[in-house]
Image: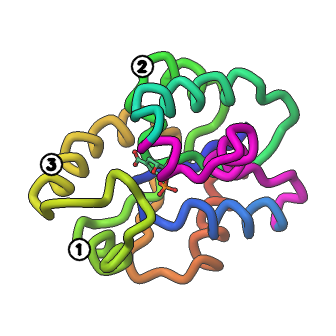
Amino acid sequence: MIYLIGFMGSGKSTVAEQLSERLGLPFIEMDAEIEKQQNMKISDIFAKHGEAYFRAQETSFLRTLEDESIVSTGGGVIVTPENHRLLNEGTVVYLKASWETIVERLQGDTERPLWQGELEDKKSRFVERLPVYESLADHIVEVDEKHPKEIVEEIFRCLNH
Ligand code: S3P
């Protein structure tokens, strides 16, 4: 299993989809799968059941994965310690975006429940998570100012070494 991890807005879904084509492996978007299972949008899951419930869905979902695939995770998949073990059973690629890139890309986003409120709080979450992404990663790919194609090729090279 190849897991793409990284903060919201780091490009996990776009890159995972293109990487899956490059490698000829299925593409799995965790958030979309959880939305299907729950028949609700992520923002509604958070509003109705809360974050802890959503985190539990992420863990259950990771446990069901079997066939080698490219998995685009949600940015907070690393919040749950149990998930660390599950992720590290596969290969973990961290798409590392700078704070400036994230802010630029997510400006005006009203869909993501954990990208609401004060910028300072969002930054604290980013700063807190950074070392966790890094410690879980088998490969770290910097994504600032790169085209998805370039990122895919970089990951492709990492995986083949
Ligand atoms: C979250 C990131 C989201 C989604 C949920 C929580 C997070 O996924 O799983 O809103 O805690 O960072 P993306 O990283 O695809 O935005």
Measure the alpha-carbon separation of dots 2 and 3: 19 Å
Residue kind at label 3, given as amino acid type? Ser
Quadrant location of the N terminus? top right
Q: What residue range appears in magenta?
A: 22-47
- Residue 55, given in percent of the width and then of the height, sits at 48, 30
Identify the residue at image location x=48%, y=27%.
53
Could you tell which of marks 2 and 3 lies nearer the N-terminus?
2
Residue 14 is drawn in which quadrant? bottom right
Could you tell which of marks 1 and 3 lies nearer the N-terminus?
1
Describe the element under mark 1 as helix, strand or loop: helix
Residue 62 is drawn in which quadrant? top right
- Residue 160, given in percent of the width and then of the height, sits at 72, 51
Of 32 and 29, which appears nearest the observer?
A: 32
Residue 22 is drawn in which quadrant? bottom right
Measure the alpha-carbon separation of dots 1 and 2: 28 Å
Residue named by callout 2: 81
User: Is most of the magenta stretch helix, strand or loop?
Assistant: helix
Residue 161 visible within the image: no
Residue named by callout 3: 124
